[in-house]
Image (cartoon, rainbow, N blue to C red):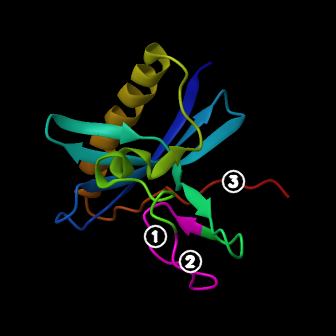
Amino acid sequence: MEITEVRIKLVTDLDDRLRGFCSITFDQEFVVRDLKIIQGQRGYFVAMPSRKIMERCHRCSGKNEVRARYCSNCGAQLAASTRMDESSAKSRMFADIAHPINADCRKRIEDAVLAAFEQEQIRASQPGYVCRYDDFDIPS
């Protein structure tokens, strides 16, 4: 598997740890979007695309965030047993949609994304800079 393209969209709000979004193309055939470039305590890291984990209401079966106290659909109070405690909730609020299976693959993705991120920061400082993140060729 070869990473054939990396596109970066820089985030300009520097009050947040999120520094950019990314899409990567594998073998010019498969695209994964919405990777996040985050500034951590030890430098930048790449977070895979994810979704919030939901639990169903006992009354209406509506979906709710795992930390919700009341159902967003019917208003019923959710049982405390279905809610996670605060310590485990932070690590279990999101589930990766796509992710590497092994550390070698994760490193190759992270290295490619962070190299492209550095290059995009350089391009962004040049006059006439235009972000290419959303400029994908869509076949008709």
Q: Categorize mark 2 by other alpha carbons within 10 Å: few (<14), some (14-19), many (20+).
A: many
Give the image location of residue 113, x and y in percent: 40, 35
**Residue 52 falls inside the magenta stretch:** no
Q: Give residue 118's mark.
A: none
CB under 8 Å between callouts 1 and 2?
yes
Q: Residue at x 14, y 40 (%)?
A: 41
| Range of residues picked out in magenta | 64-78
Give the mark, 1 or 3, whose residue is nearer the N terminus.
Answer: 1
Reply yes or no: does residue 74 show up in magenta. Answer: yes
Which picture quadrant has residue 43?
top left
Q: Front-most of 59 and 116?
A: 59
Q: Looking at the picture, how far across and down is residue 112, in whole percent?
A: 41, 29
Residue shown at 20% from the left, 42% from the top: 40
Residue 72, x across and y down, in percent: 56, 80
Name above or below for residue 42 compared with residue 89: above
Determine whether 63 is above or below 95 in the image.
Answer: below
- Residue in the foreground of this view, choosing between 56 and 5: 56
Identity of the residue furthest to the top in this view: 104
Q: Residue at x 59, y 60 (%)?
A: 55
What residue is disc 1 on?
A: 68
Amino acid carrying label 3: it is: Asp
Relative to 86, 55 lies left or right: right
> In this picture, is 62 found above or below 125?
below
Q: Amino acid at mark 2?
A: Cys
Image x and y of residue 54, in percent: 57, 59
Q: Amino acid at mark 1?
A: Ala
Query: How many C-alpha atoms fall within 10 Å of the one at disc 3: few (<14), some, or many (≥20)?
Result: few
Measure the alpha-carbon separation of dots 1 and 3: 40 Å
Q: Residue furthest bottom?
A: 75
Residue of label 3: 137
> Residue sitting at 24 percent across and 39 percent down?
44
Local secondary structure at mark 2: loop
